[in-house]
Image (tube, helix red, strand yellow):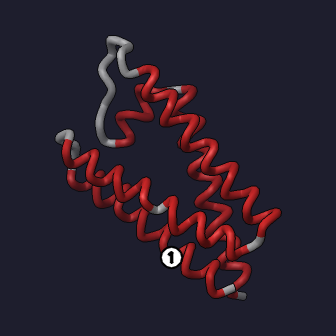
Amino acid sequence: MLTVIAYGLAVVLNLLVLFIGARFLLAPEAAATGYGVPAKKDGEAGAYLTIKGSRDASYGVLGLALLAFAGPSAAAWFMLIVALNPIFDTFIVLRHGGAKAVAFGIHFATAVTVLISAALLFLV
């Protein structure tokens, strides 16, 4: 049962990151608003939003590949390290005047969930 929960949570998290990446690539302004720091409409931020989208999408694909081909231990280390991203995102939102509810309710909560996923994968 633990294996199903560990893999299930990891798959869901990686698919969500892949979705977030795709959203930043396809609807960057809406994705930036959802992130907690809206992008300027003048287009200057377009490259950075594309970078964020491609980074997130590649992390989702990498996480799924590790689960499928390298096993739970490699995926656990990946999740442990990748948890740094939502931790940094928390500070970015706070530093740039975003809502504390978004910073902690989305980004910090995501970091905690990713760390739980890592712990479960280490236990498998």
Secondary structure of the residue carrying tag 1 is helix
Q: Quadrant of the C terminus?
A: bottom right
Q: Is residue 13 above or below residue 112?
A: above
Q: Nearer the viewer, residue 106 or 56?
A: 56
Q: Residue at coordinates 45% horizontally, 29% vertically from top-left?
A: 49
Q: Residue at coordinates 72% horizontally, 57% vertically from top-left?
A: 64
Q: Quadrant of residue 32?
A: top left
Q: Residue at coordinates 34% horizontally, 53% vertically from top-left?
A: 88
- In the rendered image, residue 20, in percent from the top left (x then y), is placed at 54, 43
Q: Nearer the viewer, residue 51 or 11?
A: 51
Q: Is residue 109 above or below residue 99?
A: below
Q: Residue at coordinates 46% horizontally, 62% vertically from top-left?
A: 83
Q: Seen in the image, is 17 located left or right of residue 91?
A: right
Q: Quadrant of the N terminus?
A: bottom right
Q: Seen in the image, is 52 located left or right of residue 57?
A: left
Residue, disc 1: 116
Q: How many marks?
A: 1
- In the rendered image, residue 104, in percent from the top left (x then y), is placed at 29, 60
Q: Seen in the image, is 28 located left or right of residue 88?
A: right
Kindly give the residue lying farthest to the top in the view shown. 42
Q: Quadrant of residue 54?
A: top right
Amino acid at pointer 1 = Ile
Kindly give the residue lying farthest to the right in the view shown. 69
Q: Seen in the image, is 121 located left or right of residue 45?
A: right
- In the rendered image, residue 12, in percent from the top left (x then y), is placed at 63, 61
Q: Is residue 96 above or below residue 3?
A: above
Q: Is residue 12 above or below residue 44?
A: below
* Label 1: how many Cα within 10 Å (few below 14, some 14–19, many 20+): some
- In the rendered image, residue 66, in percent from the top left (x then y), is placed at 73, 62
